[in-house]
Image (spheres, rainbow, N blue to C red):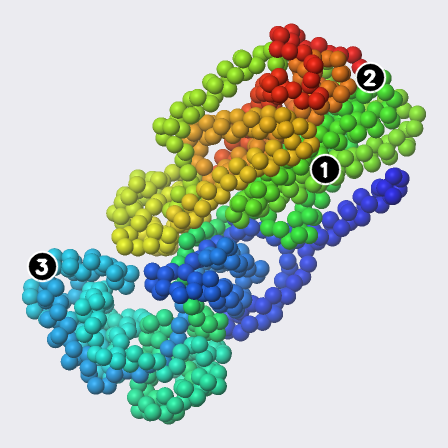
Amino acid sequence: MLGTLRNRLILIGVLIVAAILTLVPRKQAIRERGADGVMRDTLVTRDPIKLGLDLKGGMHLALELDQSKQVSADPKKDIDLALTVLRKRIDEFGVTEPVIQKVGEQRIVVELAGIQDPGRARQIVQKSAFLEFRITDKSQALEAAIPAMDRQLRALGVKGTGGAGGTSAVQQLLGGDSAKKADTTKAATDTADAGGVLAGLIRPAGRVPGEYLVAETAYPRVDSLLSLAEVRRLVPRGYELSWGATKESVGGEFVRPLYLLEDRALVTGTNLVDARANLDQLTNSPEVLFELDRTGGRKFGEGTGRHVGDFMAILLDGRVQGQPPVIQSRIDRNGRITLAGRTMQEANDLALTLKAGALPIPLKVVDDRQVSASLGADSIRSGLVAGAVGTALVILIMLGYYAFSGFLAVLALAIYVLFTLGSLSLIDATLTLPGLAGIVLSIGIAVDANVLIFERIREELRHGRTVRLAIDEGFKHALPAITDSSLTTVLTALFLFQFGTGPVKGFAVTLVLGILASLFTAVFVTRTFYLIWLQRNPEASAISLGSLKIFVDAAYDFIGVRRWAYGITAAVILPGLLFLGIRGLNYSIEFTGGTLMQVKVPAGTGAGALRSALDAQGVKGAEIQQFGGADEFAIRARVQAVGADADNTEITKQAVVRALDATLGAGKYTVENTAAVGPKVGGELRQQAFLAIFLSFFAVLAYLAYRFEWRFGLAAVVATAHDIVATIAFIAVMHLEVSLVVVAAVLTMVGYSLNDTIIIFDRVRENLKKHPKTGFVEVLNLSINETLPRSILTHLTTLATLSALAIFGGEVIRPFSLVMFFGVFTGTFSSIFIAAPVLWWIERKWPGQLAKGRGGPAAAATPAARPKP
């Protein structure tokens, strides 16, 4: 069907039109919440290619059940319930194309691209939203219990403060709400004067029965004392203590309300069916109107009917929302929550979280990444500049070396880029910053197939073939090498996708799509262009392949100098291993856990000032380095509070923010990028990275054993192992930070190295059949020499794109470029000086069918012979 030129052109035209159509922006209706809190359908222009968080800006959260606060009886069921609740909340929040998905059995990933207020979004995601209605105490039972509580505290060694507020040793030890499990016996270190403890700090409000007031300065101390198990046992039976959600101003003093409430709720939020924000027409204060289901309405009606004239507290996540109102009459299914002193946005957020339902178990953040929209725009700009420069260099090289044929390759390259972008849009893939780098890099690699074809056509022309026959034979002989090298790279990319996170997955997707597009354009499109030229020039006796020729008729004895090559390898690897043993690898926050914040500070702020501020807040040993401009710094920190969950990333992040606020002032600096990763998540990522490399080895070995012989596969794997060890040595000597992007570079380098090795081995297999009487060493040398022009030219185009990435790609991509830059050299070196000698050694020990009866070790000392065609 595709044998005729007409059909080939129709297929290419259809694919080009389809790719263009997928890249046309289109309108899409999404539901968004307006300023008045009402959800409306809005028509927006959808980008043809979905940008990742690192290019568009936004936040990525990985959440797990926080069983330090509440133990789950069935974690699998609770994580599924939490996933459903979060989906409802995010849908109500009105984010375009959110990602809410379960990863594994115990983790939920939430990605919100283009989010403008990450703090608000995080609060909505993490809020438990457990709603309760409880009656306040009217018997003054707490006042009767306080003397007994004071006696118990004095028995523990806690002394009074004479009614003054301030921080006690107990408060410092327990740290408020988050330290209820700490050792209470150390409270005796308080040296304040003796007397009443709680009696001097808790006073009746005189406004609502069961309401008490505590000075805001004394609130942390009282909360710590009331958290003691010995004190909690003395709370009147049938009642519980709950704090007010916010502080209030009473008589010019800031106080925190404390309520004694019945321990049984009239009704909970599980019976809620609807909630919406509203503005009270009388007080002009925001409120939330709610509606209960029939069962909840009946229970609520019965409970409020029994308590007409009493006061009812409305609790959300254990905190009383506003001053409890008096029950005027029976309330059935409809009611309201007043939010005096709060904003309409807070009312909207409360309404949507209540409507979505309560989380079964509180959630903790184990992985938190944020990128500002401005940083995303900078990344796109730098990526496009790097791509333009890299593409221009590749075009110049191809035109300068192959002339008219190079022009055909450039046309095919343009179609390749169109197909790659169209494929990304078609499968709705997300383009990330590493993915953008992958496209730029693949432009340099994409010409490799064309170079292989052009060099084979040159060989056929030198052997006296006609132009038409030389073109046919060139494509025929180049196809196996192109296919094998492409498929092995796809294999490594698939493992990268399987075990990588969002940005690395994006890189793997673009790499696979780029390879497939390159395979089609080089083999099918470029040949179609040649067929058009042949149809217009049927009697042509020559074709323009450029006048420049490098390493033509080369006859170097590569196998003979293998011992010198081993010495060079040792000179590179041994110092690297020495550095590796002395200081180890410099793992990034992604692998070790901790917090990375990229901040833009006021002019004149130095790293020393930032370090002093962090030390003052207990963030010891933070790494601070200039990152980009003179006023941009990257802060890497790890903080672990006593008794706190090591995988909860909020602790370190809050400590860094407090330090920056104290030194620079809130709002005086800009956080451009944040990555907060728990140590458990970091350990998993490190394990997955090693697993990806390890499994890709076996997959490649199996494929090469199938396509060639197991001897070829083993030699290729040995050469690739050499490249990985050499690259790790390079990373250790340069002390580069090992991030997920660097791991992606290592795996890409593995594919690139295999690409070189397979092309040489494919030529070895061909020459073994073509020259049955030639010694094995001569065949190896011949094959390496014949593929040398392709290797040099392909590496030149790849290095050109890598140089553009290193210079223009930005700080995040620069380590990727450096590792790949080194990988190009070591991959070429190993393909020639490691893979071929190892294959020769294996064939001497265990001769294969093709190598049996050929020359022995003595042949290695002789120069490479070139059998005549």
Near mark 2 (Cα within 10 A), the count class, few <14, some 14-19 or many ≥20, is: few
Specify whether 196 is left or right of 377: left
Which quadrant of the structure image shows residue 750? top right
Q: Nearer the viewer, residue 292 or 616?
A: 292
Q: Earlier in the sequence, mark 3 or mark 1?
A: 3
Q: For residue 463, which numbered disc appears in the image?
A: 2
Task: Tell me the quadrant of the picture where the C terminus can be found.
Answer: top right
From the viewer's perspective, is residue 428 above or below residue 394? below
Specify whether 137 is left or right of 527: left
Q: For residue 191, which numbered disc appears in the image?
A: 3
Which quadrant of the structure image shows residue 511? top right
Could you tell me the amino acid type at mark 2? Answer: His
Give the number of marks.
3
Q: Residue at x 66, y 14 (%)?
A: 777
- Please provide percent x and percent y for residue 753: 60, 29
Could you tell me the amino acid type at mark 3? Answer: Thr
Specify whether 542 is left or right of 177: right
> Mark 1 — residue?
519
SS at badge 3: loop
Distance Cα–Cα, label 3 vs label 1: 79 Å
Can residue 580 be seen here? yes
Q: Earlier in the sequence, mark 2 or mark 3?
A: 3
Which quadrant of the structure image shows residue 735? top left
Near mark 3 (Cα within 10 A), the count class, few <14, some 14-19 or many ≥20, is: some
From the viewer's perspective, is residue 40 above or below residue 632? below
- Please provide percent x and percent y for residue 825: 57, 24
Distance Cα–Cα, label 2 vs label 1: 27 Å
Q: Residue at x 41, y 53 (%)?
A: 366
Task: Tell me the quadrant of the picture where the N terminus can be found.
Answer: top right
